[in-house]
Amino acid sequence: MTSSITTAADAELAIDDLAILMEKLAGLLEQETALVHAGRIRNAAALEPTKAELAGRVFAAGERLKANAKFLRQSAPGRCAALIRLQETFRGILQKNMIVLATAHAVSEGIMRRLSGDLARKASPQVYGATGRAAAPHPKHGRPLAVSRTL
């Protein structure tokens, strides 16, 4: 349950608290983005607990502000405008982070598919088809891959 904001000082404090949390999370996202971009996945994964905790706090603070939005717009319009600008900046940082993470995921998935295909080709008998070309490996000859999720 969110607590209500009843004074202008409380409104400014609540907005400032959310802004500070968003700035911390944005810094962490930028750090994660740089680490993943540099291929330092293990180091980036170590940031996950802190990122999850900060994201939860940002969500809770945001819900509190949403519940008191009308009062906030009336009592602290300048701070609300500054928060909107901060949200736009945060959105850009988050979008870049998501693109880098999606790219890393796609690359790792491509590597796994290629490895799986190579293993299937090596496991299947080398025969020629009716056209005189090597036949594609049969799906039954594929071996399961064991993947360690520990980074």
Image (spheres, helix red, strand yellow):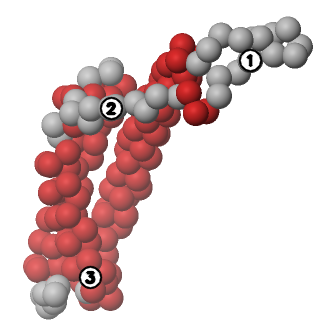
Residue 30 placed where, x, y %?
29, 37
The answer to whether the residues at label 2 and label 3 have Cβ atoms under 8 Å apart is no
* Front residue of this view, candidates 86 and 115: 115
Q: Residue at x 20, y 54 (%)?
A: 52
* Left or right: residue 74 compared with residue 100: left
Q: Earlier in the sequence, mark 2 or mark 1?
A: 1
What crowding class fits label 2: few (fewer than 14 Cα within 10 Å), some (14-19), or many (20 or more)?
few
Q: Residues within 10 Å of mark 1 (few under 14, many from 20)?
A: some
Q: Residue at x 55, y 22 (%)?
A: 120
Rendered location of residue 68, percent (x, y) = 26, 86
Mark 1 to mark 3: distance in Å? 69 Å
Packing grade of label 3 (10 A; few <14, some 14-19, many >=20) is many
Residue under numbered circle 1: 135
Disc 1 element? loop
Closer to the chain start, of discs 2 and 3, is: 3
Real-space Cα separation, disc 2 to disc 3, in angstroms: 50 Å
Judged from this view, the residue extending furthest toward the right is 131
Residue corresponding to mark 3: 72
Residue 135 is left or right of residue 24, and the answer is right
Amino acid under disc 2: Val
Image coordinates for residue 141, horizontal then vertical, percent = 56, 27
Residue at position x 27%, y 47% in the image: 26
Q: Quadrant of residue 131?
A: top right
Towards the viewer: 46 or 147: 147
* Residue bearing the label numbered 2: 147
Q: CA distance from mark 2 to mark 1?
A: 28 Å
Whether residue 65 is visible to the viewer of this picture, yes or no, is yes
Q: Secondary structure at mark 3?
A: helix
Residue 30 versus residue 116 in the image, above or below: below
Q: Nearer the viewer, mark 2 or mark 3?
A: 2
